[in-house]
Each structure stands twice: as C-alpha cells, then as structure tokens.
Image (spheres, rainbow, N blue to C red):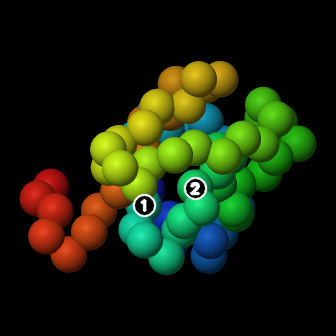
Amino acid sequence: MVVTAEASSEMDIYPNSQKSYQVTISDLPLSCPMPGMMVWCSHPKIYLSIEYTNFVKCPYCGSEYKLVTANSKF
C-alpha cells in the first residue's frame, strides 16, 4: 500500500509503518518522518534530497520515497 503525502497530512499515521511513499512537489522539502506522522516513536527527523533523482531511501528506516510529477509514470 502506498500513502500519499496528502493523506498523511490529513491524519496521524505511524512513522515507518509502510515502506513506500509517493510525494509531490508541494511536499518539498522532504523529511523522514513526514509531517503528519507521529514522531515520538520514530528516528530523528532528517531531510532527504529527492529533487534530482525522483527517488530516495531513508538511511535510518529504509522507507522509500518517490517524487511524482505531472509527467511521471506510476
């Protein structure tokens, strides 16, 4: 299951509960855990660079983030 950043900002979700997240330009700068995630039970908040590769993996928890743009294919 993939959680979009828009969904995560509307509800509290457990950080690192999923391994794949789709993010959009409006979610930048990208951090892990993302806004809307409960941070009390996660690793320290770090910022991830996704702008040039459209993909990044968190070095702490292994969560994968994919940047979805208007011309991206799922």
Looking at the image, residue 29 lies above or below residue 57: below
Residue found at the very far front of the displayed protein: 52
Task: Specify the quadrant of the image occupied by residue 51.
Answer: bottom left
Which of discs 2 and 1 lies nearer the camera? The answer is 2
- Residues tagged 2 and 1 counted as in contact (Cβ below 8 A): yes
Residue found at the very far right of the displayed protein: 40
Whole-percent x, y for residue 43 in the image: 78, 31
Residue type of the residue flagged with mark 2: Leu
In this rendering, position of residue 8 left or right of residue 72: right
Can residue 71 be seen in this snapshot?
yes
Whole-percent x, y for residue 11 in the image: 65, 69
Q: Give SS at disc 2.
A: strand
In this rendering, position of residue 62 left or right of residue 35: left
Look at the image and tell me in which quarter the C terminus lies: bottom left
Residue at image mark 1: 23
Task: Specify the quadrant of the image occupied by residue 20.
Answer: top left
**Could you classify mark 1 by the number of other residues whose Cα lies within 10 Å: few (under 14), some (14-19), or many (20 or more)?**
many
Residue type of the residue flagged with mark 1: Val
Looking at the rendered structure, which numbered label has been put on residue 30?
2
Q: How far, Cα to Cα, is label 2 from label 1?
A: 8 Å
Q: Residue at x 61, y 36 (%)?
A: 16
Of 23 and 8, which appears nearest the observer?
Answer: 23
Q: Give SS at disc 1.
A: strand
Looking at the image, residue 30 lies above or below residue 47: below
Of 17 and 71, which appears nearest the observer?
Answer: 71
In this rendering, position of residue 1 left or right of residue 26: left
